[in-house]
Amino acid sequence: MRDPRATMPPAAWLRRHAPLIAPGARVLDLAAGHGRNARFLASLGHDVVAVDRDADALSALAGVARVATRVLDLETPSWPLAGERFDAIVVNHYLHRPSFDAMLAMLSDSGVLIYETFAAGNEAFGRPSNPAFLLAAGELLERTRGRLAVVSYEEGRVDRAGGAAVIQRLAAVGRHYARPWPLPEARDTGAEW
């Protein structure tokens, strides 16, 4: 029986910002898990490298066109992807601060970073609750300041299936990004300006 996580839809933040990625891009899906985002990116015509330490999870991507998988431990002292370059990097629900700079170094100067993970305050709603896995207030903005131009950023509580969570989301582009920004449609949160 196929694991239902292998057929989950891609992350909404990724769907919203995928138009930023140039056609036919080489994309890294970092901590890809069962590959819901890798599958989506491949369906758009991108060549995806899906990386995770869980070989069983990555096996859900076996035979998916335009997706190459790599079983790697991303938390070793030596960054396992050093020297590689990508046109886009996608991260969903993963944080390992010691490798953040090494990850950014792999992004081309005209590349796209689409990142979403849990933030401080999430401990009130469940896992993850360890501060090592929760972004501090504004941390994604600080880590990319001076390196990337922010297209879109969100931080705060979200309600989702299974309960609430506290997240940070960032979509940003490199300093040599030359395509017009296909800005995502703003969502009305009901808040006053």
Image (cartoon, rainbow, N blue to C red):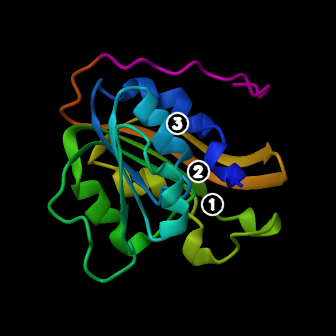
Q: Vertically, is 53 above or below 107?
A: below
Secondary structure under tag 2 reads strand
Residue labelled with disc 2:
168
Residue 170's spot in the image, x, y percent?
49, 43
Give the amino acid at mark 3: Leu
The segment highlighted magenta reads 180-193
In the image, 149 versus 60, the foreground residue is: 60
Give the amino acid at mark 2: Gln
Q: Disc 1 and disc 3: Cα gap in Å?
A: 18 Å
Magenta segment, prevailing SS (helix, strand or loop): loop
| Residue 152 visible in this rendered orientation of the protein | no
Residue labelled with disc 3:
14
Looking at the image, tell me whether mark 2 or mark 3 is earlier in sequence order: 3
Can residue 184 be found in the magenta stretch?
A: yes
Q: Vertically, is 15 above or below 170?
A: above
In the image, 159 versus 29, the foreground residue is: 29
For residue 72, side relative to residue 40 (left or right):
left
Q: Vertically, is 38 above or below 60?
A: above
User: Which residue is found at the position 27% from the left and 33% from the top?
Assistant: 25
Q: Which mark is residue 111?
A: none
Picture mark count: 3
Q: Disc 2 and disc 1: Cα gap in Å?
A: 6 Å
For residue 135, side relative to residue 108 (left or right):
right
- How crowded pointer 1 is (Cα within 10 Å; few <14, some 14-19, many 20+) is rated as many
